[in-house]
Image (cartoon, rainbow, N blue to C red):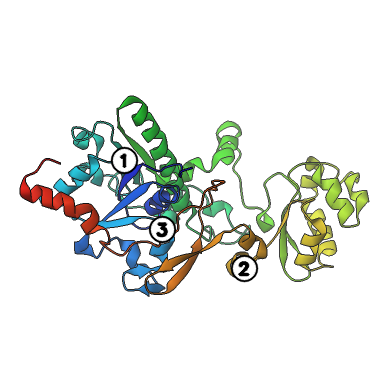
Amino acid sequence: MSLPLHGVRIIAVEQYGAGPFGTQHLADLGAEVIKIENPDEGGEVGRAVGPHFFEPGDSHFFQSFNRNKQSITLNLKKPDDKALLVELIKTADALYDNLRGDLPEKLGLTYEALAEHNPALVCVHLSAYGREGARKAWPGYDYLMQAEAGYCSITGEPGGPPARLGISIIDMMTGTTAALALTSAVIGARATGQGRDIDVSLYDVAMHNVNYLATWYLNEGVQTERAPRSAHPSLVPSQLYKTADGWMFIMCNKEKFWPVLAELIGKPQWATDPRYSDFKARLAHRDELTAELDQVLMTRRTGEWMEHFAGRVPAAPVNTVAQALDTPFAREQGLVQATAHPVRGHISTLACPIRCPGETLPSQAAPRLGADNERILGPLRRARAQGEPH
């Protein structure tokens, strides 16, 4: 057996979070991802994102997004270096960038600019606001997208200030969407011999994620607002509840779970109580039900309730990040992996969430700046110096 993307070659002009997150998925699945970094700027900016470093130019942040890749150094504003990029794309399936929307055209990284060298080349562009329109030259970041797409307005407690999600979820979802776009376009190009440009933007993905809330508004004029304790806007119980030592989230998002929960917490009569007998009734009496559930759930610790429910009721503890990583189930699932590192001996990162039964996915630390220059660029430079065809 071989990894799903074995034999796919991707040249990546990428930086920071969203772009590298997408190509890390592809590298984990066997693609050859050649990362181009500008040596005149010390490599991509993620290498300098602190506050934690394994060595200079090798931040924890960089290691989190660049596993299983290769690094070469080129300044694409220099003609000789741009010529080497052209030689590379002749053997590549895709050229992937996450630059500001106006830059791919200025740098000649579009399909129109490169098709003569490789007609089947796929050019994937991940930008903040797209390569067309009034904002194509605007810089943009995850938190800005959360603010503009409405996330902050529906996150947090009613009456409190707007709040963003605690992680850069738009960056990572856009990177994953770009990986889907790339693989889809490469399949098409291999079938037809015809490449293309394909675009993904932080803004588009952030807006698309609004999903059913958008459908409610667009068709019924309903504007979703924050609900106490991160509650679902219509399904009850589906929110945070207090326990003896903290909090847990319970989600009876199907009617079948409500009588099971009522039975397990010693309140079987609630299953037929007119106040709580169905979603509509429970929504009308949510505050009352919240108080009653708190009273019951605060008689035991979160861990005890989790053992008691044992998967019969959809529930989860409210963990810190440290607790989430240290839980036995995360280790059982193999979500934390050790990777060899030239300075630390080994480092721990999160494993690829895609599983390939029968295969062991690669686990190579993110490369040092220019680590693959000689192996990849050396032959190209020597051939150009000798005027040989390549």
Q: Of callouts 2 and 1, which one flags the residue occurring earlier in the amino acid sequence? A: 1
SS at mark 1?
strand
Indicate the amino acid at tag 1: Ala
Which quarter of the picture shows residue 324? bottom right
- Please state, as top left, top right, bottom left or bottom right, where the C terminus lies in the image: top left
**Disc number for residue 326:** 2
**CA separation in Å, label 3 and label 2:** 22 Å
Give the residue at x 30% y 51%: 34
Label 3 with label 2: CB-CB less than 8 Å: no
* Front position in the image: 389 or 313: 389
Q: Is 385 left, or right, of 166 in this rendering? A: left
In screen coordinates, is 255 left or right of 155? right
In terms of sequence position, does the residue under pointer 1 or pointer 3 come before the other? 3
Residue at position x 32%, y 73% from top?
Answer: 56
At mark 3, the secondary structure is loop
Q: Which residue is tagged 3?
A: 67
Residue type, mark 3 in image: Arg
Q: Residue furthest right?
A: 269
Where's residue 137, x and y in %?
A: 27, 47
| In this view, the mark in front (3 or 2) | 3
In space, the residues marked 2 and 1 are separated at their CA atoms by 38 Å
Q: Residues within 10 Å of mark 1 (few under 14, many from 20)?
A: many
- Say what amino acid the circle numbered 2 marks: Asp
Q: Which mark is residue 94?
A: 1
Q: Residue at x 89, y 49 (%)?
A: 270
| Residue 81 seen in the figure | no
Q: Is residue 63 left or right of residue 324?
A: left
When the figure is inspected, residue 343 is found, relative to residue 105, above or below; the finding is: below
